[in-house]
Amino acid sequence: MSFAEYTDWILSEGWLRRNEALPTRARVAAKGQRNMEVLFAAVDARARAQTQTLRDYTHIASTSVDPVIDLVVRLIQEDEQRHHLLLARIAASLQDALDWSHSPEALPSTNVAEAVVDRDLWSMTRLLAEGERRDVRSLRSLAREFDGISDGLHTLLLDMMRLDSEKHSRLLQFITRRLEAAVAMEQRLGNRVAATAPRHIARGTSATGTSGAATLSAGLSSVSPAQVLGDQSAT
């Protein structure tokens, strides 16, 4: 019996009626497994379909004698190639989750515990995000100035740049949230250290009167992750 067949067996109502003692968590886990399989099938089907789409774009780019069409199609082709690679990595990640394996093609782990708290990176990310938002406004205004020129090609390309800047802004927001989550994790670990420290450290001082783990933990827990990153990036 395959794993998928075993999952279907667990989810079958007849089997559940014969096994009233089945823990709820087993049913939930089985449903989660089935959802993962459905997602994998959908992503895999999308990746397969995109393979043909890439062939079609390649054919147009290689046969067209119009340099404008060639330019536009190659821009689309570059995006489609990147999408195809990302879909393949998403599919590999889902397959790893189903097989309890780890392949080099899979996406990196999103476990916050593995993230590195980098204050300089956080500060730079915020500046870059602000720059991308400014670019969105600037490119939208610039595209209007080119309206009606060169059959709309300049406006089209500027609009594509604006959409890219909007995408970059969203990606940078994700990075910022991840860095702040890493700081929050660091704060929680500091609280645990303070909770398990010896009594003279938990009180906030050591035998020589120096600050202990509890003092550090209290200082960290009294501010937000964004404040921690901002304060330390300014030093």
Image: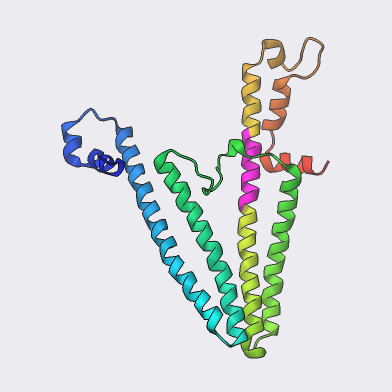
- Counting from the top left corner in percent of width and height, residue 189 is at 63, 28
Q: Residue at x 62, y 19 (%)?
A: 195
Quarter of the figure with the C terminus: top right
Q: Residue at x 55, y 79 (%)?
A: 61
Location of residue 224 by image quarter: top right
Query: Viewer-proximal residue, 171 or 10?
Result: 10
Compared across the picture, whether 96 is left or right of 62 comes to left
Q: Which residues are magenta?
A: 174-185
Location of residue 25 by image quarter: top left
Q: Is residue 103 above or below residue 203?
A: below
Residue 98 is inside the magenta segment: no
Q: Is residue 52 above or below residue 172?
A: below
Compared across the picture, whether 232 is left or right of 23 comes to right
Query: Viewer-proximal residue, 179 or 89?
Result: 89
Query: Viewer-proximal residue, 135 or 42?
Result: 42
Quarter of the figure with the N terminus: top left
Q: Is residue 5 above or below residue 203?
A: below
